Image: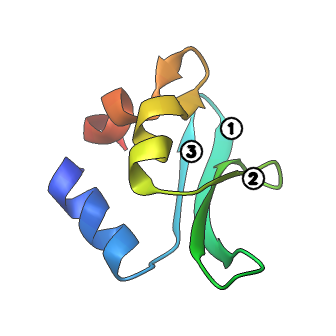
């Protein structure tokens, strides 16, 4: 997946699910109490909330790798 395709998925708020090393990861969306969108990403049922796509790309990890560096293999 290219970064542009990934950003498009976030723009249209499309959920994403994939497996890596036998573990299932997913990305969904939620809203803060004030109505702002948050991205929920992580292992299935263990997702962490990210306030922006930038925060997600700069801090989310899959095992010991940054998520942004794994986009081309998911």
> Please, what secondary structure does the residue beneath circle 3 have?
strand
Q: Are marks 1 and 2 in contact (CB under 8 Å)?
A: yes
Mark 1 and mark 2 lie on one chain; the one further toward the N terminus is: 1
Give me the disc on residue 23. Answer: 1
**Residue farthest to the front, as pictured:** 34
The residue that mark 3 highlights is 19
User: Residue 44 location in percent, x, y?
Assistant: 75, 52
Query: For this view, does 58 lie left or right of residue 5?
Result: right
Residue 30 drawn at (x, y percent): 67, 75
> Disc 1 or disc 2, which is closer to the eye?
2
Left or right placement of residue 67 versus residue 72 in this view = right
The residue located at (68%, 78%) in the rendering is 31
Residue 7 in sight here: yes
The residue under label 2 is: 44
- Residue 47's place in the image compared with 57, above or below, is below
Q: Label 1 to label 3, Cα distance in Å? A: 5 Å
Q: Pointer 3 and pointer 2: residues touching (CB < 8 Å)?
A: no
Front residue of 23 and 67: 67
Q: Is residue 45 above or below residue 59?
A: below
């Amino acid at each position: 997946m290219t970064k542009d395709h990934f950003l498009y998925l976030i723009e249209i708020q499309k959920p994403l699910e994939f497996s890596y090393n036998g573990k299932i990861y997913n990305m969904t969306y939620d809203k803060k109490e004030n109505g702002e969108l948050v991205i929920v990403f992580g292992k299935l049922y263990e997702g962490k909330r990210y306030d922006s796509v930038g925060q997600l790309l700069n801090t989310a990890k899959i095992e010991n790798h940054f998520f942004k560096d794994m986009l081309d293999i998911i």
